[in-house]
Amino acid sequence: MVLARTFASAKTFARQDLLKLQVKVMLRRGSDISDSGLRGVERGLDEHWIRWVMLFGIDHTDKLVAELSFEIDWATHKVLLQGGRDCVVIPSNWAADTAPELDEAVRAFETTCKRLNLTQEWRVRYDSWVDFEHANRTLGFTPARPVSWRHPPEELRLGIPELEEATVTVRFA
């Protein structure tokens, strides 16, 4: 007789910490962000100033060809916290504590950037109520130059079931 055993494991994270971890994984894998840039992003997330963290793939004509964004809806986040959902249990299919949706999106972005020899940049966008000049000074950021799409992009939006306030979006032109 053959017996099979299955073990399932799960980890628990503070919701805010897990959101920051997903953003840091995305930025480290998809860009050459500096330590000071990463500290600025973390502070901007702690303050709830940053709503979008984005990776851009830009071609030799300075046109946008690929984008990966991680959006946090802070209003939903607040409701979840007020409802006692300040901790998140992640299932065992999260490799290296990274949401599978984000992992696949980063992989698609990286593959496209390498295949098309795109320059990779990271950027943030603040929530609408934020004084962006104050936030930039505090976080050590400067306004980014505008870029436009090479062609109208195709878009895929992915929710992360364990992090209801987060949306991962990939766009390719």
Image (tube, rainbow, N blue to C red):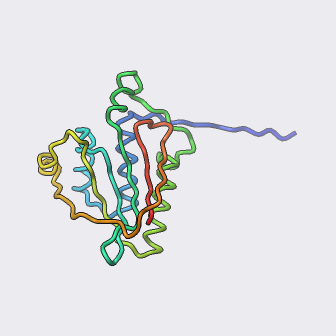
Residue 25 rendering spot, x and y as whole percentages: 39, 53
- 19 or 170, which is in the foreground? 170
Task: Tell me where residue 144 sits by quadrant.
Answer: bottom left
The front one of 150 and 48 is: 150
Identify whether 128 is placed above or below 79. below
Q: Which quadrant of the structure image shows residue 61?
A: bottom left
Q: Is residue 19 above or below residue 169?
A: above
**Which residue lies most toward the right here?**
1
Number of numbered discs visible in the structure rendering: 0
Image quarter where the N terminus lies is top right
In the rendered view of the protein, which quadrant contains the C terminus?
A: bottom left
Q: Residue furthest bottom?
A: 60
Q: Is residue 118 left or right of residue 95?
A: left
Seen from the viewer's position, the closer of residues 116 and 38 is 116
Could you tell me residue 65's position as x and y percent? Answer: 40, 68
Query: Residue pushed farthest top?
Result: 83
Measured as percent of width and height from the top left, residue 67 is found at: 39, 60
In the picture provided, is 133 more to the left or to the right than 119?
left
Q: Position of residue 28 (x, y in %)?
A: 36, 58
Please indicate whether residue 140 sits to the left or right of residue 37 in the image.
left
Residue at x-position 23% and y-position 38%:
47
Residue at figure coordinates x 28%, y 57% from the top left: 123
The residue that appears at 26% across and 38% down in the rendered structure is: 48
Give the residue displayed 48% in from the left and 56% down from the top. 105
* Closer-to-camera residue (172/47): 172
